[in-house]
Image: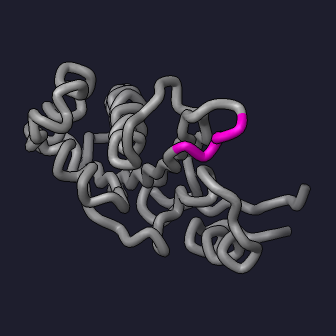
Amino acid sequence: TIAVKFKYVPLHEPIKVYADASHNIHVGESTRGHGGLLITVGNSAPIHFRSFKLKTYTRSSSESELLVLDEAGTYLSWLKLLMVSLSASPREIKVYQDNISTMVMSSGKLSFKNSKHLYGKHTNLIDAVKKGDIVIEHLPSKEMLADFLTKPTSRPMLDDIVKKLSLTYL
């Protein structure tokens, strides 16, 4: 593997979370999707990243993305507690998402007819968004930094992500 150098910034920068999913990417072995989370403080190197197979079957790409956002919420709760224990004041948390339907669902505006199976599963995420603890913003797929955690990525695209994450090859 290639060695990589990291650059970190002070803790007063905003927390940024990039959450992405690929629906039904594991078609041969199962029909589950794949999720990716990447957490940074400001424009620094990642403080956390995770690539994982979704634990449940989903009916749509929006539902897959919602599962990843819900997973991000558990990490963000832990991160807020960590910041408090380090005497760093809690700050704005921006979660970047490339699926507009998922953003609508995370705001609690679920269409009961098509998404009643989701009620009750994601109430913590919906509550956090409604309280303003988490701000979800749209980010085009081309700019999604967690994209490489969910699907194969070309070398030029990976080099661009490495640069945007303040990483450099040694």
Left or right: 4 in relation to 161: right
Identify the image quadrant of residue 168.
Answer: bottom right
Q: Is residue 62 one of those drawn in magenta?
A: no
Give the residue displayed 53% in from the left and 32% down from the top: 54
Give the residue displayed 37% in from the left and 62% down from the top: 98
- Vertically, is 13 above or below 27? below
Measuring from the top left, give residue 4's x and y in whole percent. 78, 61
- Write down the region rendered in magenta: 24-28
Q: Nearer the viewer, residue 162 or 64?
A: 64
Give the residue displayed 69% in from the left and 70% down from the top: 158
Give the residue displayed 16% in from the left and 41% down from the top: 129
- Vertically, is 111 above or below 19? above
Report the magenta stretch's main SS: loop
Measuring from the top left, give residue 116's x and y in whole percent. 17, 28
Measuring from the top left, give residue 6's x and y in whole percent. 68, 60
Q: From where the camera sits, is residue 151 visible?
A: yes
Quadrant where the C terminus is found in the figure: bottom right
Identify the image quadrant of residue 13.
Answer: bottom left
Residue reaching furthest to the right: 1
- Marks counted in the figure total 0
Q: Nearer the viewer, residue 128 or 97?
A: 97
Measuring from the top left, give residue 125's x and y in whole percent. 24, 33
Q: Nearer the viewer, residue 46 or 155?
A: 155
Left or right: 48 in relation to 78: right
Q: Is residue 25 one of those drawn in magenta?
A: yes
Q: From where the camera sits, is residue 83 visible?
A: no
